[in-house]
Amino acid sequence: MSLLQDMLVYNEEFVREQKYEKFITGKFPNKKMVILTCMDTRLLELLPQALNLSNGDVKIIKNAGAVVVHPFGSIMRSILVAVYELQADEVMVIGHHDCGMSALHSDSMVEKMKERGISDETFATLQHSGINLEKWLTGFDSVSDSVTHSVEMIKRHPLLPSGVPVHGLVIDPKTGKLDLVIDGY
Ligand SMILES: [Zn+2]
């Protein structure tokens, strides 16, 4: 059975047996916070439990590295939606140690793309269109510097209302221990 089939079969049972009941909650976060964190698999359950978060408590936005790359990209838009439309009063950025983005180098990823059939013409076209893959596909050296940078991007955003604290933290993906980088109060 494929992974997809596997999930669909399980899902039928999940719904039929009403296993969803313990997750029922509203769309507004009980703890009035929006968290940006990394898509790392180790954080899937660890992060909510290490922060004492249950379904319905917070908004969580995830991407590779917990990074705000662009002030008008989808991450910043999601944060603003959470603040203006969904009653989040605080923002928290949580990076983590041993993040895949800290080891990301564009040349090795471009090499893998070529191996998987992306043509030289495609790279040439992108380059001519002004897309800088080297910059776009490069991660960060220090997770706390990266968290600090993202916190600054959010805090200084022209559309973020004043009085919204923006915190920065780093989590250990094994123990769940949090280190405070920036106290937004
Ligand atoms: Zn990560």
Image: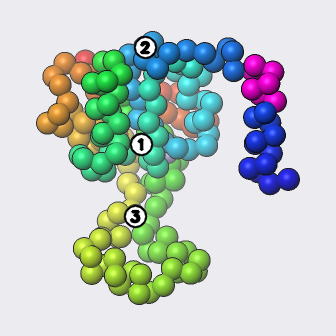
Q: Which amino acid does label 3 sit on?
A: Leu
Q: Which amino acid does label 1 sit on?
A: Ala
Q: Label 2, label 1: how many angstroms apart (C-alpha)?
A: 20 Å
Could you tell me if the residues under marks 1 and 3 are in contact, i.e. CB atoms within 8 Å?
no
Q: Which of 3 and 51 is in front in this view?
A: 3
| Mark nearer the N terminus (2 vs 1) | 2
In the image, the segment drawn in magenta is: 13-19
Of the numbered discs in the image, which one, if any, rests on residue 66?
Answer: 1
Q: In which quarter of the image is residue 134?
A: bottom left
- Residue 62 lies in the magenta stretch: no
Disc 3 or disc 2, which is closer to the eye? 2
Q: Is mark 3 on a helix, strand or loop?
A: loop
Residue 41 drawn at (x, y percent): 61, 43
Q: What residue type is labelled 2?
A: Lys
Q: Is mark 1 on a helix, strand or loop?
A: loop
Q: Does the residue labelled 1 lie within 8 Å of ligand 1?
A: yes
Q: What element carries label 2?
A: loop
Of the numbered discs in the image, which one, if any, rests on residue 137?
Answer: 3
Residue at 63 percent across and 18 percent down: it is 23
Residue 108 drawn at (x, y percent): 49, 73
